[in-house]
Amino acid sequence: MNNPRIPALTVSTTPWRRSILGGMRHDAGRRMLPRPDLRGRALVGAALALVLLAACGTSNYRYIDNAKESTFFKVPSSWTVFRQQAAQPTDRASSTVATTTAGPWTVVVDAAPKPDVAHADDRYPAFPVVRAEIGTLGQQGHDILSIAELRKFSTDFKLDPIDAANTGDPTVEVVSYKEITTASGVRGVHLVFNWQADGQRWVTIDESAYVDVKTTRVYRLAIRCESKCFKDNRATIDAIASSWQVRA
């Protein structure tokens, strides 16, 4: 029988522990990064008009843009777009100690024939679902954010896929992994992995998680679906992931 999942990467036996804050390690028992409030639930029940850019010569895709954050990505024109019913974030920093919200910006895009914003919270969506989020870090998050913490966004902070694969966790298969620093100083990770979250079924997740040069804003683009669905839609998902641009 053909493998319904994307082949996994051979992972190094030495855990990736490099911190984007200059050598700080994340180890068991040490402080965990509080999750930024990125998952606002006030999403409109029908697709709202977004700021859409020209599709660069093709009608197959449209661009979704957050102009205030200089962030954009493209999705197939036939997919349904939902956005959070809130203003785009405007403040660039937080003075509070805990993780804060500054009108978190969330967009969900659903490829299902019967689209529903709730599909973004399905563990094993049958069709590709995209979630783009921008949130603000408080002072504590600013102080302890690391590459390992960015990787945990993809599993709702249940585990770090790279560490899990390095330690032989049979429920995690890393497909690809890259640490990124842009010319403007935005830095983060792009990670694709298969995850058997309930010990039975597999989901494949493509996660890009970045932080700005001041370590005050987090930018995420997550694309997921059941692993066979992901494999069947790999070209489209790769096109979406590669279009994600953060120029903060």
Image (spheres, rainbow, N blue to C red):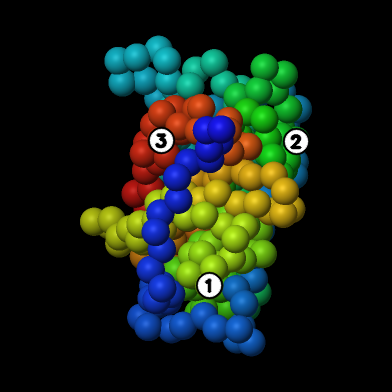
Q: Indicate the quadrant containing the N terminus: top left, top right, bottom left or bottom right.
A: top right
Name the residue at 34% across, 14% down.
Answer: 58
Q: Nearer the viewer, residue 11 or 154?
A: 11
Label 1 vs 3, first from the N-terminus: 1
Q: Is residue 242 left or right of residue 124?
A: left
Relative to 242, residue 187 above or below: below
CA gap between label 2 and label 1 equals 33 Å
Residue for badge 3: 238
Report x, y in % for residue 121: 72, 43
Residue type, numbered disc 2: Ala
3 or 2: mark nearer the eye: 3
Left or right side of 84 for 247 = left
Q: Residue at x 50, y 45 (%)?
A: 206
> How far apart in space, not on screen, are marks 3 and 2 (Cα)?
23 Å
Q: What's under tag 1, amino acid-wise? A: Thr
**Residue highlighted by disc 1:** 167
Q: Of the residues tagged 1 and 3, which is closer to the observer?
A: 1
Mark seen at residue 118: 2
Label whose residue precedes the other's in the sequence (3 or 2): 2
Whole-number angstrom distance, CA of label 1 to CA of label 3 = 28 Å
Q: Amino acid at mark 3?
A: Asp
| Number of numbered tags placed on the structure image | 3
Can residue 128 be spotted in the picture?
yes
